[in-house]
Image (cartoon, rainbow, N blue to C red):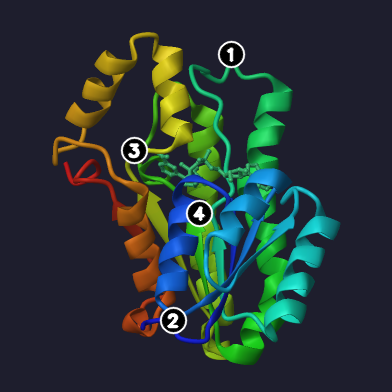
Amino acid sequence: MQLKDRVALITGGNRGIGLATARLFAQEGARVMLVARDQAKGESEAALIPNAKFIPADVTQAGDCRRAVEATVQAFGGLDILVNCAGIIYRNRTVEQTTEDEWDATFNVNVRGTFLMCKYALPHLRARKGSIVNLSSYVGLVGFRGASAYAASKAAIVNLTRSMALDHAREGIRVNAVCPGSVDTEMIHTAWEQFGDVETARRLWADKHPLGRIAQPAEVAQTILFLASDAASFITGAALAVDGGLTAG
Ligand SMILES: NC(=O)c1ccc[n+]([C@@H]2O[C@H](COP(=O)([O-])OP(=O)(O)OC[C@H]3O[C@@H](n4cnc5c(N)ncnc54)[C@H](O)[C@@H]3O)[C@@H](O)[C@H]2O)c1
């Protein structure tokens, strides 16, 4: 068991990559707090995971982030791992087509949310020499057509990760980012629906990855587990591509 008796807080933990990570962490012996906005789904998913609880929170709200961290520490006695999975995307938007509200919403969830959760988790992580894993994207490493706000926010997460890694290395806190290619979650299903023909979209999305398919959430969860665990004890400030070779060329 790679995370025996560790305590993890996972934002966006009620579905997609966050939920897959929560399930894997629990299998590896962790106690897990799921954090997301949808209370009904969060509670029902947490009830199916051993040693898991759920707390509703909007990561754009400082008070919610502070409460989520405090509730985790109160429930489980401390905090070892923070995984920032909560994220949103507006597709089919060049800069001209992006409204100011869409830009702000993207940065509020993806960047401010990550910042706030880190800010309130750090005092507890320091006490246990814990670690943080932030969800960036392959589009945090390369440009992305049609979702410039999202790509900019994911690049910001990469450099936030690197800067935090430097700031907190001597405290024994490791901070890393994961940069997935396309992953089979509701986020991608929405993109396929927007494309129109879901079966064609599914094939096109698979074809653009050198491995010829998109990832399953469990495959990204395995990478998050690796970075959060002692197996990655000398890794900090990394932005690890889990992208089927997409950024290799
Ligand atoms: N699916 C992909 O292809 C893909 C690829 C690269 C990176 N990512 C990133 O991985 C992360 C997880 O994505 P996913 O595919 O599981 O997406 P998803 O849409 O299935 O899940 C996103 C989660 O974020 C939560 N969330 C959104 N706004 C929130 C807010 N204000 N407060 C609290 N929670 C909020 C949602 O409730 C949900 O649980 C995201 O950061 C996403 O950008 C996804």
- Between disc 3 and disc 1, the foreground one is 3
Q: Name the side, left or right, on which 15 lies relative to 43.
A: left
In this rendered view, identify the residue nearer to me: 225 or 20. Answer: 20
The circle drawn on residue 198 is none
Please give the name of the residue rendered at 65% of the width and 40% of the height, measured from the top-left corner. Answer: 107
Please give the name of the residue rendered at 67% of the width and 54% of the height, measured from the top-left corner. Answer: 43
C-beta proximity under 8 Å, tags 4 and 1: no
Please give the name of the residue rendered at 21% of the width and 22% of the height, measured from the top-left corner. Answer: 203
For marks 1 and 2, the one nearer the N-term is 2
The residues tagged by marks 3 and 1 sit, at their Cα atoms, a distance apart of: 23 Å
In the rendering, at what x and y percent does residue 164 appear?
A: 57, 70
Q: Is residue 121 above or below residue 139?
A: below
For marks 3 and 1, the one nearer the N-term is 1
For marks 3 and 4, the one nearer the N-term is 4
Q: Give the amino acid at mark 3.
A: Ser
Q: Give the amino acid at mark 4.
A: Gly
The residues tagged by marks 4 and 2 sit, at their Cα atoms, a distance apart of: 16 Å
- Residue underneath mark 4: 18
- Residue underneath mark 3: 182
In this rendered view, identify the residue nearer to me: 4 or 152. Answer: 4
CB at disc 4 and ligand 1 closer than 8 Å: yes
Mark 2 residue element: loop
The residues tagged by marks 1 and 2 sit, at their Cα atoms, a distance apart of: 44 Å
The residues tagged by marks 3 and 2 sit, at their Cα atoms, a distance apart of: 27 Å
Q: Is residue 26 above or below residue 46?
A: below
- Residue underneath mark 1: 97
- Between disc 3 and disc 2, the foreground one is 2
C-beta proximity under 8 Å, tags 3 and 1: no
